[in-house]
Image (spheres, helix red, strand yellow):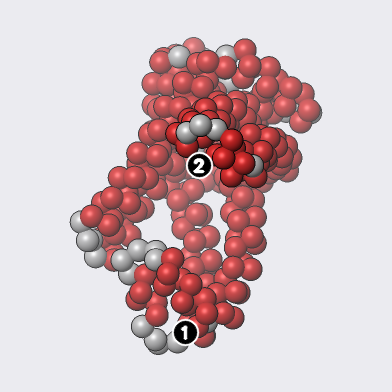
């Protein structure tokens, strides 16, 4: 397993040009969304000081006051959130297709990346939609009964502490299930990108391999998830704790985003190497 992890990290680093491409696409998407939201807000808020109220971070009380003062502007922003999420998910599917196939075939050019993203967009979209349904089912099955009956459960047990223990247990089970779904999702896409057979056969193969190697794959998922989370925390801490100026904060954020992209690429490459979808260069 560790050999695959180290090899996956090495492969991801060697594919740093693709990380730059992914960053630029995400940045362009963010600029488009940000400009639209900013334009919508500026039409109503104008040159007031309202926008400066969030300069030190999000304040829910301030948000509620602004919601009352500028209902139309914020309502437009809220209505656009589902569209933004859907658009981001579609772009992510495209990026995943380009990245996974490019790593498998050892292609580093931007043209190959774009071509692979378009070629595998629809199959990866269907695979992603399948696992989105499974993710929603997992979330509903584990969390809905507890959250809906939270007050009744608290009143029926001897100590509130037991309720939090119950949440901890459900949380652990949820993370284990999430690990299964994420690993199976990536493995299914890897299988399809390698063999180019039916989506159903790739889903079947992805689940079969994930269940067979569930423990090491869970360790791999946990390790990369923790690393990505630590990078996010460091980025937030550095941005808020050091009081960086706008441009320095922007550049620092870009650096951390690149590192997080490399972590995700390392995760994909590790799973590819572990299931022998790719091999060491010396094996060719």
Category of crowding for the residue at label 2, using alpha-carbon neighbours closer than 10 angstroms: few (below 14), some (14–19), many (at least 20): few
**Residue 134 pos. (x, y %):** 70, 35
User: Please, what secondary structure does the residue beneath circle 2 have?
Assistant: loop
Q: What residue would you read off at disc 1? A: 45
Rendered image quadrant of residue 3: top left
User: In the displayed structure, would residue 25 be above or below residue 229?
Assistant: below
The mark nearer the N terminus, 2 or 1, is 1
Residue 239 visible: yes
Q: What residue would you read off at disc 2? A: 109
**Residue 100 pos. (x, y %):** 57, 34
Name the residue rendered at 52%, 79% in the picture: 68
Distance from label 2 to label 1 (Cα)?
A: 44 Å
The image quadrant where one finds the N terminus is top left
**Residue 279 pos. (x, y %):** 51, 17
In the foreground, 176 or 42: 176
User: In the displayed structure, would residue 144 be above or below residue 268?
Assistant: below
Q: Given contact means CB atoms under 8 Å apart, are the residues at marks 2 and 1 in contact?
A: no
Nearer to us: label 2 or label 1:
1
């Amino acid at each position: 397993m560790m050999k695959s992890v180290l090899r996956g990290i090495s492969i991801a680093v060697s594919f740093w040009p693709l990380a730059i491409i992914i960053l630029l696409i995400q940045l362009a998407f963010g600029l488009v969304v940000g400009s639209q939201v900013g334009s919508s807000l500026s039409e109503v808020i104008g040159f007031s000081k309202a926008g400066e109220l969030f300069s030190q971070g999000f304040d829910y009380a301030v948000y509620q006051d602004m919601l009352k003062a500028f209902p139309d502007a914020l309502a437009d922003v809220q209505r656009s959130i589902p569209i933004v999420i859907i658009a981001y998910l579609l772009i992510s599917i495209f990026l995943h297709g380009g990245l996974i196939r490019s790593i498998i075939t050892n292609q580093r050019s931007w043209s190959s990346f774009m071509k692979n993203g378009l070629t595998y967009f629809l199959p990866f979209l269907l695979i992603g939609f399948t696992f989105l349904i499974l993710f929603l089912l997992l979330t509903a099955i584990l969390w809905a009964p507890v959250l809906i009956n939270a007050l009744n459960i608290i009143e029926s047990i001897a100590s509130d502490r037991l309720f939090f223990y119950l949440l901890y247990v459900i949380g652990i089970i949820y993370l284990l299930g999430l690990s299964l779904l994420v690993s199976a999702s990536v493995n299914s896409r890897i299988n399809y990108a390698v063999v180019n057979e039916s989506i159903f056969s790739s889903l079947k193969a992805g689940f079969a391999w994930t269940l067979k190697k569930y423990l090491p794959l869970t360790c791999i998922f946990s390790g990369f998830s923790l690393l990505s989370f630590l990078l996010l925390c460091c980025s937030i801490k550095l941005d808020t704790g050091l009081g960086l100026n706008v441009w320095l904060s922007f550049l620092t954020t870009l650096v951390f985003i690149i590192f997080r992209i490399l972590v995700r690429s390392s995760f994909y490459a590790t799973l590819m190497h572990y299931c022998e979808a790719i091999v060491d260069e010396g094996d060719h």
